[in-house]
Image (cartoon, rainbow, N blue to C red):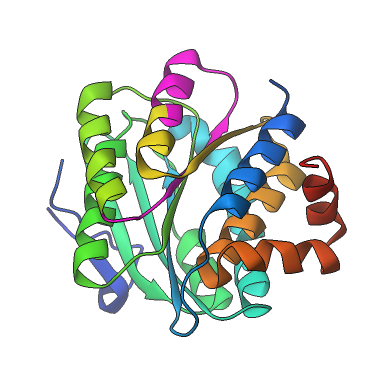
């Protein structure tokens, strides 16, 4: 598979494998908070995966604007490296190297445009598994609105991540029922969480990305500390009582 010219060669790997929004967000934070915290020390590693098919351009642009919040949130509790994974077109699925600062990730994302095609969530799960085995991954977050693959195949891959203790956080934009069914099951099998956010709702997606970044960098206790400094997180945690 050819290299994507929009990503510097030194930081790119090519993949080789083929209720209400407020209530959903609160449930996600509750699920993440209930997880066991990571051991102290070391850098948190988060795979940040996005559907980059044509319908996703508005959300891609929104994610570009919000990605800095993940680094800022993680910095409050530790450190974070992010590996960007995206798919688009008929068979293109690519991953960056591990990125440690927002400027580099923002520059990278700005070079990528969405293209029409089918979902390739299976490749995202396979790439995360490979990284979990070779380099260690604390969590995977996926942002998308559709699922056009075999649910059984996706569940098999999700089960492997579950065995490796890598939770997957599936953030669904919109209300596609097939996507919801698959996303929920992937989250369940990995010990992660599913959450819906409204189309174009930057504030909702920001809360989710900040929460998962805090979890990746500092575990369950980081979410508690986040609630003491971030009004949005405090409101979410308040709904969990």
Locate residue 216, reporting x and y percent.
Answer: 51, 65
Residue 121 in sight: yes
Q: Nearer the viewer, residue 218 or 210?
A: 218
Q: Is residue 201 above or below residue 98?
A: above
Locate residue 95, reporting x and y percent.
Answer: 30, 59
Circle count? 0
**Quarter-of-image position of residue 13:** bottom left
Q: Nearer the viewer, residue 63 or 70?
A: 70
Q: Quadrant of the C terminus?
A: top right
Residue at point 34% right, 66% down?
A: 7
Q: Is residue 222 left or right of residue 152?
A: right
Residues in magenta, as a range: 164-184
Locate residue 65, reporting x and y percent.
Answer: 66, 58
Q: Nearer the viewer, residue 112 or 14?
A: 14
Q: Is residue 76 above or below residue 170?
A: below
Q: Nearer the viewer, residue 1 or 133?
A: 133
Residue at point 43% right, 37% down?
A: 187
**Quarter-of-image position of residue 122:** top left
Q: Is residue 113 left or right of residue 229?
A: left
Residue 150 in sight: no
Q: Is residue 45 magenta?
A: no
Residue at point 48% right, 22% down?
A: 180
């Amino acid at each position: 598979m050819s290299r994507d010219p929009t990503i510097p060669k030194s930081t790119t790997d090519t993949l080789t494998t083929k209720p209400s929004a407020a209530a959903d967000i609160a449930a996600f934070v509750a699920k993440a908070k209930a997880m066991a915290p990571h051991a102290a020390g070391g850098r948190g590693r988060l795979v940040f995966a996005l559907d980059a098919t044509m319908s996703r351009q508005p959300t891609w642009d929104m994610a570009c604007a919000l990605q800095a919040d993940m680094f800022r949130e993680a910095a409050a509790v530790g450190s974070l490296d992010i590996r960007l994974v995206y798919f688009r077109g008929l068979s293109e699925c690519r991953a960056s190297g591990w990125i440690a600062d927002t400027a580099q990730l923002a520059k990278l994302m700005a070079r990528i445009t969405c293209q029409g095609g089918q979902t390739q969530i299976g490749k995202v799960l396979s790439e995360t598994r490979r990284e979990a085995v070779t380099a260690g991954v604390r969590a995977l977050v996926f942002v998308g609105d559709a699922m056009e693959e075999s649910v059984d195949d996706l569940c098999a891959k999700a089960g492997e991540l579950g065995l490796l203790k890598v939770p997957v956080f599936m953030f669904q934009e919109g209300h596609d029922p097939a996507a919801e069914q698959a996303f929920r099951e992937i989250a369940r099998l990995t010990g992660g969480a599913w959450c819906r956010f409204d189309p174009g709702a930057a504030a909702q997606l920001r809360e989710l990305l900040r929460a998962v970044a805090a979890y990746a960098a500092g575990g369950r206790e980081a979410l508690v500390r986040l609630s003491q400094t971030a009004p949005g997180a405090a409101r979410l945690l308040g709904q969990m009582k």
